[in-house]
Image: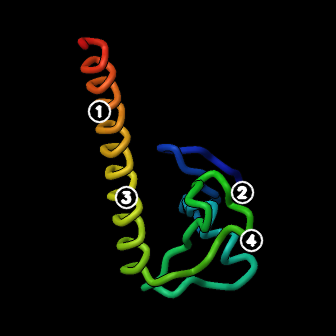
Amino acid sequence: MWFNRFVGRWFVEWAENGKRIRMLRSRWIWEQEHGPIPEEYDVHHKDVNKENDGLDNLELILSEDHDNLHSFLKFSKMVDTEIEWFRKDGESESQTSSSKY
């Protein structure tokens, strides 16, 4: 068994019956403690840090809820970025306007 980093995620890999098996490290850690993960569930990182595979940071949630949560978080991050951009843009405008007079 070995750990491997692939596409920004950690995996556990091993050979079984002549086949190479690869599993996300977070899923492997969860299964070592709690047993098999039902098909309709995902392992979620509570702090949204995919590098933090500590058991206390992992929770099992429905795949649909997991997808919705990450869509919401991605949208929220985009909104925060846009708000920050508008704030910076507004500040520079007001500074420019005040310096004209």
Q: Kindly report the distance in space between the C-alpha atoms of the residues bearing marks 1 and 4.
A: 42 Å
In which quadrant of the rendered view does residue 63 lie? bottom left
Q: How is the image coloured?
A: rainbow
Q: Kindly report the distance in space between the C-alpha atoms of the residues bearing marks 4 and 3.
A: 25 Å
Report the residue at 73% width, 76% height from top.
32
* Location of residue 48 in the rendering, given as x and y in whole percent from the top left corner: 56, 59
Disc number for residue 56: 4
Q: Left or right: where does residue 79 sit relative to residue 37?
A: left
Camera-near label (4 vs 3) is 3
In which quadrant of the rendered view does residue 5 lie? top right
Residue that mark 3 sits on: 76
Camera-near label (1 vs 3) is 1
Q: Kindly report the distance in space between the C-alpha atoms of the residues bearing marks 4 and 2.
A: 23 Å
Q: Earlier in the sequence, mark 1 or mark 3?
A: 3
Crowding at dot 3, Cα within 10 Å, few <14 / some 14-19 / many 20+, comes out as few
65 over 51 or under it: above or below: below
* Residue type marked 2: Met
Q: Earlier in the sequence, mark 4 or mark 3?
A: 4
Residue that mark 1 sits on: 90
* Residue type marked 4: Asp
Residue that mark 2 sits on: 1
